[in-house]
Amino acid sequence: MTPPTTTGPSTKPPRPRSPRFPPHNAPRVWFLTTGTSPIAIALARQVLEHGDYIVAGVLPLEFEKNNERSEEFREFLEEVKRTERWRERLRVVGLDGRIVGQCQAAIAEAVEAFGRVDVLLGCTSEAVIGTVEELAQSSRSLSLVQEQFETNFFANVNIIKAALPSMRQMKNGHIIMLTGITGHLGTPGLGMYCASQWAIEGYCDSLAYEIAPFNIKMSIVQPNMEVNVLTNRLTSVPPLPQYSPDVNPAPLARDILSGLLDKLDMSNNPPSPMEGTSPDSPASPASGDSALPNPSTGDLLSSPHVTSLYPPLALSVKDALIAETVHALTAIGGHDNPPARHIVGFEGVASVKEKLKTVSEELEDFIEVSSAVDIAKGDESGGIADQN
């Protein structure tokens, strides 16, 4: 008998709108290394609503600045105050991960407040934009290389080392490191950022074997490059003319990100005709003014000075950008058998597969060449080894 055919929409079950938290017997205690990041705030809302506890590390200097990033975190704190079931489940601690003593004090405060740390989420990150040569132009640009590693590598290493003793004593814990597919894929113009991502991933891969006997799990979560880069601070060094798009065809990160930021500017602030002009006619500059428009956010990445900024993401854009990553974090955080590595999104998986395929082909070519050399060396009829 032939099976009945179905027409119409797919019978595949829809993707769950709310995260599926792993089962557990008691509320978990999460420690977020950068509580002001959009991912940390969205994650905190999810796990607080679920009944877990949150300890959010905040860089005091960043929190005191009156910018959009600190304002978003202040709004979240007001939301916590208004929500009674959240109020006693959140603790904010001062934390500069680059300082070992602050890491130790922050973990100690978390343990004192809630008894333990079950899940440590390393989400401290920033991106320095510039080619290798551009980063070597001045003492300031050279110092950015060290700062890149201090933030993306050592800050996360310091908080991990501070948390391990208590996790080892409990014989339980889960460390999640949020990196990106840049931990697999090199990106022109983001060389130092990618290097810091590869460094922390190599550290975590090695650490996982050392802490496994203590029932401490390690997971690396890799979202698309845009997730971490566009939700954290961007710092750009002055471009060199040799790497301008009209001279150098390499698809540099500066140009790609500038285009993205310009699109964000257009979506947040659509252009409107100046008073006294029609929408179809060009706007006339005022007397004595130059005809150059105000620089867009994307233009700032090509500034002749070192420039730092937080990408101006609208709330709807930000929520859509981080939704899948937050879903993945809540699904594996504290799981009894979490994945060692989780690549978020089909695009990221496809990119990494293509990269690994290329590397495999290169290794096969290398082996063939090496074998040919070895045969020549051992050839008794006058190989390389006999030519003396």
Image (cartoon, rainbow, N blue to C red):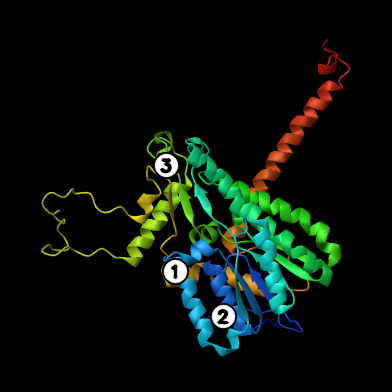
Asked whether the beta carbons under mark 1 and mark 2 sit within 8 Å of each other, the answer is: no
Residue sitting nearer the eye, 10 or 272: 272
Q: Quadrant of the N terminus?
A: bottom right
Residue 360: % across, % down: 70, 45
Q: Nearer the viewer, mark 2 or mark 3?
A: 3
What's the amino acid at mark 2? Arg
Q: Is residue 138 left or right of residue 160?
A: left
Point 42% across, 33% down: residue: 242
Image location of residue 189, percent across then percent down: 50, 44
Tell me which numbered mark, 1 or 2, is placed earlier along the sequence: 2
- Verify CB contact (< 8 Å) between mark 2 and mark 3: no
**Residue 250: x %, y % from top left:** 47, 40
225 or 33: nearer the eye? Answer: 33
> Residue most toward the top?
388
The Cα atoms of the two marked residues, 3 and 1, are separated by 28 Å
Question: Is residue 216 visible to us here?
Answer: no
Which mark lies nearer to you, 3 or 1?
A: 3
What residue is shown with label 1?
Answer: 317
Q: Which residue is mark 2?
A: 17
User: Can you identify the residue that label 3 sits on?
Assistant: 238
**Left or right: 21 as drawn, with respect to 61:** right
> What residue is at 44 percent from the left and 39 percent from the top?
249
